[in-house]
Amino acid sequence: MSDPTPEPPAPPPMPSFNNLKPTLSDTTLKSISVVLHTGSSIISSDNNNALPPPTPVQSASIPLLLTNKDVAVQALTGSGKTLAYVIPSIEMILRRTSPLKPSQISTLVIVPTRELASQVYSVFKIFTDGTDSINTPICCIGGEGTTAKTDLEKFVKLNSDIMVGTPGRIHDILTRYSTVDVREIDVLILDEADSLLSMGFEVQVSGILKRLPQMRRTGLFSATMTRGVKELSRAGLRNPVIVNVNVQGGDNASKTSNTPSSLTNYYLVCPMLEKLSRLAAFLLDHKDEKVIVFFLTCTAVDFFGSAIKEILGNKMEYCEDLHGKMNQKRRENCLKRYKESKCGALMCTDVAARGLDVDDIAWVVQFDSPTEPSQFTHRVGRAARAGKSGRSLVFLSPEEEAYVDFLKLRKIPIEELGGGERAGEQCLLDMMEGGGGEEGGEGGDGEETTETTSSETTKTTVTATKTITSDNKIRNILPAVKSLVLSDRDYLEKGTKAFTSYIRAYKEHNLHFIFRFASLDLGELATAFCLLRLPKMPELKDSHGSLNFEPAGEEINIHGIKFKDKNREKARQARLVKELAAGGKNAKQVKAEIKKAEKLQKQKKYVEDQKAKGRNTNKKRGKNAQIHDEWDELAKEERLHKKLRKGKITKQEYKNLMRGDDKKGGGGGDLDSDEDFDDDLSM
């Protein structure tokens, strides 16, 4: 009789929070259930089916921190890093043999942005609300209406055991005040460590480390391990365990990816002049989903975000802006509304690229590529979080297409956006043809004109082409945006600021060998930003004459374009009167431009009136009129020659004026165009 076939070994048990070693307390398990929205009412260490399995980064990090190990964790955005340090932090407090005294803290968490700090704080609060053994945590961040002193007053009142905050505020609290006792600290967490360094917080982080006891646990969490992060790890951690969580490719197990396997990345190559129209088409096509759109600068968010909201109008259920120059209350309200909405678009800078956990983001769109290579991973990580599927799209100009190969070298799989994903772009054309009215700025077939009043005496005609050149499905919305610029000075100023900040940010791009400033078509860029005149800035100084840019005609009185906001317009008029009264070179130029615009407007009106009466406007002028014109020309030449002799104008200005170019420098500019706009890259 043959021996019975041995039974195959039992498969290893599925990973679970319940069977992690050391074992987690029932209090912590119940709070995990709340955080993960399981809704289970029976949670205990004996119930293995009540909780979903922990993510790989949680399975690796939680036991290490609970067994007194320092950890340096590299894991993808959206992999569950927050719970990987929140859970052991809570357990350490619950396991303390002696309770914390007033003003002592057990856990200190440092994160790079206010939004991420608020989010981490809210997760900690769910855990502390589930037990009487841990006091309410405190969130210490900057912003309007808060100071280090008010944070400390709140800290004393709550007697907090856990402190979460941004580097600047935490450093201020620990260096200027002695209220917080850090001698009993159990664990320090540095979340998004690469961002802490890239955003310039190295000095503050080093100052904080010097004030903490060496007998502590430290957890360093980051999506990328840069050289700076490794140096920080050597300085702040003692014999750390390195945890590196990679994603295996589905078709090739040996192939790893630096983005989640459930995330599909796309790119779209299109000219600069088409980007905004394609973005609008994309947003309409995905109006029933949550989309987040990243821009390079704060001013770009202000300009393009406002324009898209105005043009698409009620076609989008939700559309908001978010960037680092907004006050804190507005940022919090904006983020709250976005989280609570079922669909819509969030226009933002990289302030939203780190750690923000928003459910069900279907698409991440990068209107502008990030200047920091690692930021691509953080941006796209807003989608496909916690195992959910998601997609991302990055817009590239033909000169930037080499970025695709760069991403592939960085183990980021990406493919060109195919016809299936682009089929819905027809909806923008349908919406605009369906009578966009005031929102769209145009409607109907072929070419149309939209008359926009820019002042009480000025009317401007804008021609809107039906479709963009390379794709007959996409409506060209730039004429509609230009109509907004001509009708509201707010758009005029936002567009100019967005243009200047974009140029300065692009010029400082870290991947300058791909995003070459010399290859940037500044004239086409100015057209894409719907500028009426080129601003005065060093980058344009030697290029005005050769730029592929057609400024608005001299009959457009830029100084007459008003703010729709009556209070802002009243204040502007007061400033304008004051500046004109003070005189000076700029005031003279403004007066000359206004005078010339008014003259051309009168001439245009005269021609229109003559045509209305059926008269021939091309009739030759009389001999007397020609003689008067010649005398006027001689008088003008004499005046200019006199100014040249007295040194009031240069030879080049004399030549320009003799040629009839009243805008010294070629592109002209409005009263505010020489303002020194700060570069607001990513914050």
Image: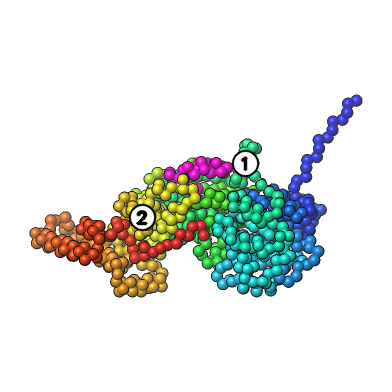
Q: Residue furthest right?
A: 1
In the picture as drawn, the residue positioned furthest to the top comes out as 1
Is 121 located above or below residue 277 in the figure?
below
Residue highlighted by disc 1: 256
Q: Residue at x 66, y 46 (%)?
A: 245
- Name the residue located 78 percent from the left edge and 40 percent from the top edge: 11
How far apart in space, not on screen, are marks 2 and 1 (Cα)? 44 Å
Residue 648 horizontal side relative to residue 7, left or right: left
- Tell me: 358 left or right of 521: right
Residue 438 seen by the camera: no
Number of numbered discs on residues: 2
State the residue in front, 264 or 425. 264
Residue annotated with mark 2:
540
- Label 2: state its secondary structure: helix
Residue 171 % position (x, y)? 61, 65
Q: Which residues are magenta?
A: 394-417
Q: Where, by quadrant of the figure, is residue 39 drawn? A: bottom right
Q: Is residue 410 above or below residue 628?
A: above
